[in-house]
Image (spheres, helix red, strand yellow):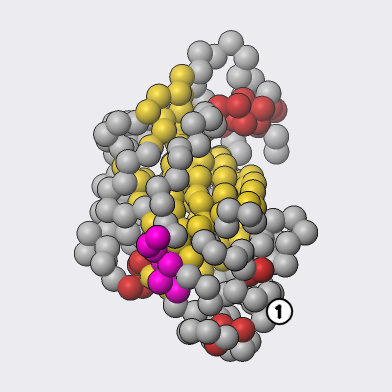
């Protein structure tokens, strides 16, 4: 159901502000202080040169768990947006050519329904058929070896949105899952290349306000086959407010 049918946004005073005291995290699982140095949370190794293309070693979809902690309550919370960058460095691998027309087009995506990442993270989205939805865009910069992912996730029925108080779980709130499927791994070279993945920003918003998080709590980058330094450089913040997209959804 289109949001325009549920909540006309005309006349609202929209405010976008940096959430100074809020923090964000990225992990292959919900990141908490007790697992922040664990390999399963930080690093994924596909098995070495050529092994991940054997149709056996890399067969499970990996989840990038984006989470955040808000310091103050956001009244009428309605959704989140996450911005990630994949740094490949060197020659651009076919494996990460995930944009339209690429070797693995569509193999990295965010699901319509956010998947729980264990008891340490709280899923703030309502459950039920079509209660939430996602819009994801992917930009591939082959020349500079970067892939940028922007995922907007929001509740579809804004007539019953709830306030979002500070989280009580140690991992905070789930903002989104970005899934890396093994689709095409056997025919698209480079799955074994060192890659770094960074969470640049998390935005969370109500019907009238957007808060922007750029500060990490524990860690905002991940390693794929050991690709951290020098490939993983802090990305320039997205700068543009998510509001342009949000306003279009609510019209």
Which of the pair 67/2 is nearer the observer?
A: 67
Q: Residue at x 30, y 31 (%)?
A: 20
On screen, residue 36 versus residue 136, left or right, reads: left
> Where residue 87 sits: x, y (%)?
50, 57
On screen, residue 73 versus residue 226, left or right, reads: left
Instruction: Spot the residue most to the right.
Output: 101
Q: Residue at x 60, y 65 (%)?
A: 91
- Main SS type for the magenta part? loop
Residue 196 visible from this viewpoint: yes
Instruction: Spot the residue most to the left.
Output: 34
Q: Quadrant of residue 227?
A: bottom left
Query: Which region is colored magenta?
Result: 223-230
Q: Is residue 233 magenta?
A: no
Instruction: In the rendered view, tell whether residue 88 sits above or below residue 51.
Output: above
Residue 63 visible from this viewpoint: no
| Circle 1 crowding by C-alpha within 10 Å: few under 14, some 14–19, many from 20 | some
Instruction: In the rendered view, tell whether residue 61 sits above or below residue 79.
Output: below
Instruction: Spot the residue most to the top.
Output: 11
On screen, residue 239 versus residue 218, left or right, reads: right
User: Which quarter of the rendering shows the N terminus?
Assistant: top right
Instruction: In the rendered view, tell whether residue 183 sits above or below residue 68.
Output: below
> Where residue 197 sits: x, y (%)?
46, 58
Which of the pair 122/181 is nearer the observer?
A: 181
Where is mark 1, residue-wise? Answer: 187
Q: Residue at x 57, y 45 (%)?
A: 150
Secondary structure category for the residue under label 1? loop
């Amino acid at each position: 159901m289109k949001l325009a049918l549920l909540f006309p946004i005309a006349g609202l005073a929209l405010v976008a502000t940096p959430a100074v005291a809020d923090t964000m995290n990225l992990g292959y699982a919900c990141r908490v202080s007790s697992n922040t140095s664990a390999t399963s949370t930080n690093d994924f190794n596909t098995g070495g040169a050529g092994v991940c293309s054997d149709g056996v070693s890399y067969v499970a979809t990996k989840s990038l768990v984006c989470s955040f902690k808000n310091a103050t309550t956001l009244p009428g919370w309605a959704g989140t947006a996450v911005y990630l960058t994949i740094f490949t460095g060197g020659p651009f691998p076919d494996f990460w050519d995930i944009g339209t027309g690429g070797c693995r087009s569509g193999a990295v995506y965010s699901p319509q329904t956010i998947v729980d990442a264990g008891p340490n993270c709280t899923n703030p989205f309502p459950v039920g058929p079509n209660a939430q939805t996602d819009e994801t865009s992917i930009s591939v910069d082959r020349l500079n070896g970067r892939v940028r992912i922007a995922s907007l996730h929001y509740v579809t029925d804004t007539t019953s949105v709830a306030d979002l108080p500070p989280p009580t779980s140690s991992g905070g709130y789930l903002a989104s899952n970005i899934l890396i499927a093994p689709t095409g791994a056997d025919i698209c070279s480079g799955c074994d290349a060192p890659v770094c993945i960074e969470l640049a920003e998390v935005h969370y918003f109500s019907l009238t306000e957007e808060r922007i998080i750029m500060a990490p709590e524990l860690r905002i980058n991940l390693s794929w086959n050991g690709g951290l330094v020098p490939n993983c450089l802090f990305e320039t913040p997205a700068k543009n407010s998510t509001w342009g997209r949000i306003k279009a959804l609510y019209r």
